[in-house]
Image (spheres, rainbow, N blue to C red):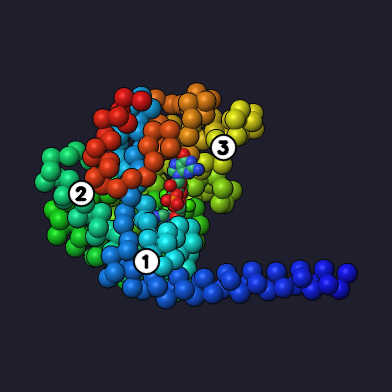
Amino acid sequence: YAKRHGANMLVFYHDQMKSSYEEIMIETELYHAIEKEELTLYYQPLVSVHTREVMSVEALIRWSHSKMGFIPPDQFIPIAEENGFIRVLGDWIIEQVCKQLWQWDQEGFVMPKVSINLSYEQLKSDDFVSRVFTHLKTYNISGKRLAFEVTERILVEVSAETMQKVHAIREAGITLAVDDFGVGYSSLSYIERFPVDTIKLDKVFVNEIPIPDKKLAIIKAVFHLCELLNIQIVVEGIESIEQLNQIPIHLEASIQGYFFAKPQTASELMKNMNEIKQL
Ligand code: C2E
Ligand code: CA
Ligand code: CA
Ligand code: CA
């Protein structure tokens, strides 16, 4: 028994040490990732159900480290949010997106809009709005071509000061999407206070086939709510035709998921664009 207990303890300590060592590695290495050009933005299409047109793409960051290999954003974004580096990283992401839109414009590739994930930490930074406007100006991009995705947490915790920034952003034409809708907070009161343009229904609502009745009821209610409030709806995580056929999709809804397209590099996207529309 003692031996088994001992072995368990060892495993336990080993796991703990491994995770904290990895976190420290990630934290240290992330500071150099931009200058070492290890970061890339991938783009995943949001496709209109009705027209099958690519309405926009979501920018998703990828980090490939020379020794640690591929590190998923779920692992390093929370660390960057905690130590504040997300302000630098987030600013870099916004600039890269503006630059990419400019480049697509030069190449005659039509991309109406890019959606960018925003952390609360970024919004809190004093020069956030002016930095965004600077990037738009530098690359000659209209605010209408950007959307910011925020989580429900931001909407619940938002201060008067950040609310002012939100209004400034929207006055420039930038739209606002609520990401991972339905998994964070149950109160919907923020929708009344907050200028929400788009709701992105979280993939947990569609990840079971067949979709259980209760989930289906929630999906329908969200569609109805969005229709009444004139909010665009995006369904996330559609991987198969079975999933797509299950949901009572409103004509104006968009779909984001592996079924239509995976996140891909800017040049892959340009090559694959026609195939996406034919699906
Ligand atoms: P998210 O904003 O909810 O992004 C959607 C995630 O779902 C992405 O994972 C995407 O690759 C994945 N996905 C898309 N379609 C499907 C599908 O059909 N099935 C499944 N199972 N997954 C699908 P990814 O790229 O690993 O990003 C994970 C999270 O990391 C994001 O979740 C977001 O919270 C964060 N993140 C990614 N890029 C950025 C960024 O540039 N800035 C910030 N602040 N956060 C980011
Ligand atoms: Ca997102
Ligand atoms: Ca999401
Ligand atoms: Ca997320």
From the top left corner, tell me how far across and down residue 61 is, in percent.
36, 56
Residue at which label 3 appears: 207
| Label 3 neighbour load within 10 Å: few <14, some 14-19, many 20+ | some
Q: Is mark 1 within 8 Å of ligand 1?
A: no
From the top left corner, tell me how far across and down residue 56 is, in percent.
30, 40
- Residue at 60% of width from left, 34% of height from top? 208
| Label 1 neighbour load within 10 Å: few <14, some 14-19, many 20+ | few
Camera-near label (2 vs 1) is 1
Q: Is mark 3 within 8 Å of ligand 1?
A: yes
Mark 3 is on which residue type?
A: Asn
Mark 2 is on which residue type?
A: Leu
From the top left corner, tell me how far across and down residue 253 is, in percent.
40, 31
Do the residues bearing badges 1 and 3 touch, measured as CB atoms within 8 Å? no
Residue at which label 2 appears: 101
Secondary structure at badge 2 equals: helix
- Give residue 252's quadrant in the image: top left
**In the picture, which quadrant includes the N terminus?**
bottom right
- Left or right, 235 with reference to 14: left
Secondary structure at badge 3 equals: loop
Cα separation between marks 2 and 1: 28 Å
Cα separation between marks 1 and 3: 34 Å
